[in-house]
Image (tube, rainbow, N blue to C red):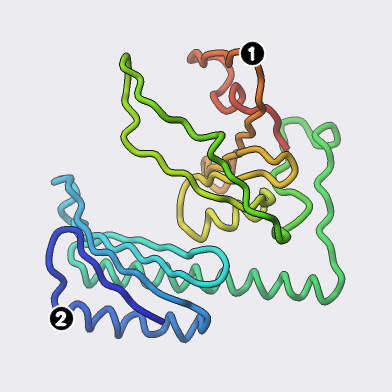
Amino acid sequence: MDIVVKSRHHEVTDRFRRHVMDKLAKVQEMDGKAISLTVVLGEEKNPRQAEQKDRIELTLDCPGPVIRAEASAGDPYSALDLAAAKLQAQIRKAKDRRKIHRNRKANGETIKRIPPMADLPPGIQPLLTAESAPRANPEVDVKPYSLSGPDHNGPMVVREKTHKATPMTLDQALYEMELVGHDFYLYVDKDSGLPAVVYRRHAYDYGVIHLEPSDEPAEPYVNGNSSPSDKMAGARR
């Protein structure tokens, strides 16, 4: 496994590189199929966060979803220790999930489909789909859904990215969102073939936004009315 160390602001010292190699050697032991591990050292610009001014971002490239972890501390060595612990926890989580999936497949088990909305108690919405992992699918070009072009009367788009995405279930999107440590995850829904976003709410709750093409203009959100996600969601599962 290749370990690449980068810094956004300062030159990386040999001492810190040695600490990185020693600290992250266990990662390769935990995931023998890992291809590369990128370590990025940065700084928090907010002076109010001086006690956590050094930030470490770790990105593990391996077969399957990319695994990420990040942490901040008063010095880069402490930040690396925290980020490494998070990364190892993410790797263990991924390995446990693969093990459970293999056992289910070997035993011929299937996940029961969540009942329709009408069958659920009031106030409860289904979250997971019937399948826990995507099957092999051709890559889907999501460029038709990207926005481009500056608006001269408002904010200007300064960065645009287009990614190819394999359609996946909501369960798989949740799993990959947890691996990268983000609060939201954009994906192509396997059932509808359209973009969707899963996002973290309060505590351990999650929300899902499904987009449904329509010729009618979307209603603006007004404070006190229904939530933005209700206005944007074309369907909820």
Which residue does the image show at 61% across and 39% down from the upper left? 196
Camera-nearest residue between 179 and 75: 179
Q: Look at 68% across and 75% down and name the residue there.
A: 99
Does residue 80 appear to the left or right of 113 in the view shown? left
Q: Is residue 137 above or below residue 194?
A: below
Query: Relative to residue 94, is residue 78 drawn left or right?
Result: left
Label 2: few (<14), some or many (≥20) within 10 Å?
few
The local secondary structure at tag 2 comes to helix
Q: Quadrant of residue 55?
A: bottom left
**First in sequence: mark 2 or mark 1?**
2
Q: Where's the N terminus, which quadrant?
A: bottom left
Q: Position of residue 112 (x, y in %)?
A: 84, 54
User: Where residue 81 sits: x, y (%)?
Assistant: 31, 73
Nearest to the observer: residue 36 or residue 162: 162
Q: Nearer the viewer, residue 228 or 120?
A: 228
Q: Is residue 45 left or right of residue 159?
A: left
Total number of numbered discs in the rendering: 2
C-alpha distance separating marks 2 and 1 = 60 Å
Q: Is residue 181 above or below residue 227?
A: below
**Compared with residue 168, is residue 211 higher up or lower down, i.e. above or below?**
above
Name the amino acid, label 2: Asp
Q: Quadrant of residue 22?
A: bottom left
Seen at 59% across and 57% down, the residue is 175
Which image quarter holds the C terminus? Answer: top right
Q: Position of residue 164 (x, y in %)?
A: 55, 50
Q: Which mark is residue 216?
A: 1
Residue linked to disc 2 = 14
Q: Amino acid at mark 1?
A: Glu
Q: Residue at x 49, y 82 (%)?
A: 30
Give the SS element for disc 1. Answer: loop
On the image, the x and y values in percent for residue 216 come to 64, 13
Bin the neighbour count of mark 1 within 10 Å (Cα to Cα): few under 14, some 14-19, many 20 and up: few
